[in-house]
Amino acid sequence: LRTPQFYFMYLMFVLMATGGLLVTANAGPMSRSWGLTAAALTLVLVVLLVLDVAVPDYDISPGILLPLLGAILALLGLEASAVWRGVR
């Protein structure tokens, strides 16, 4: 608690948590504006969550997940995939 590094790391934690909460809070309005149904958005999020939990972070993960998530983002379209990647 006496070092500036601790407070810097704590600030980074708070900023990341705030960003995550804002994205989560705006997921519903954003999906409605894009015309996605709640079922489609839920399906995509559940698939991503299951893949994240089911596939450990070994050397094989990028070879499986990158093409799969790339295909999912290609199906969502350019605008939606840009937002998913954080390039808005």
Image: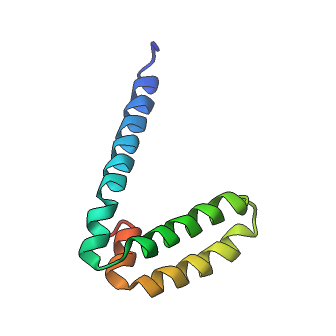
Does residue 87 appear to the left or right of 75 in the view shown? left
Q: Residue at x 40, y 41 (%)?
A: 17
Residue 56 in which image quadrant: bottom right
Res 88 seen here: no
Res 28 seen here: yes
Depth check: 51 or 19 in front?
Answer: 51
Q: Position of residue 70 (x, y in %)?
A: 53, 80
Does residue 65 appear to the left or right of 14 in the view shown? right
Residue 85 in which image quadrant: bottom left
Q: Position of residue 11 (x, y in %)?
A: 37, 32
Screen quadrant of the C terminus: bottom left
Depth check: 43 or 67 in front?
Answer: 43
Q: Is residue 57 above or below residue 43?
A: above
Does residue 54 appear to the left or right of 28 in the view shown? right
The colour scheme used here is rainbow
Q: How many marks?
A: 0
Depth check: 5 or 20 in front?
Answer: 20
Q: Residue at x 39, y 49 (%)?
A: 20
Q: Is residue 6 above or below residue 57?
A: above
Residue 18 in which image quadrant: top left
Q: Position of residue 48 (x, y in %)?
A: 56, 66
Q: Residue at x 37, y 35 (%)?
A: 14
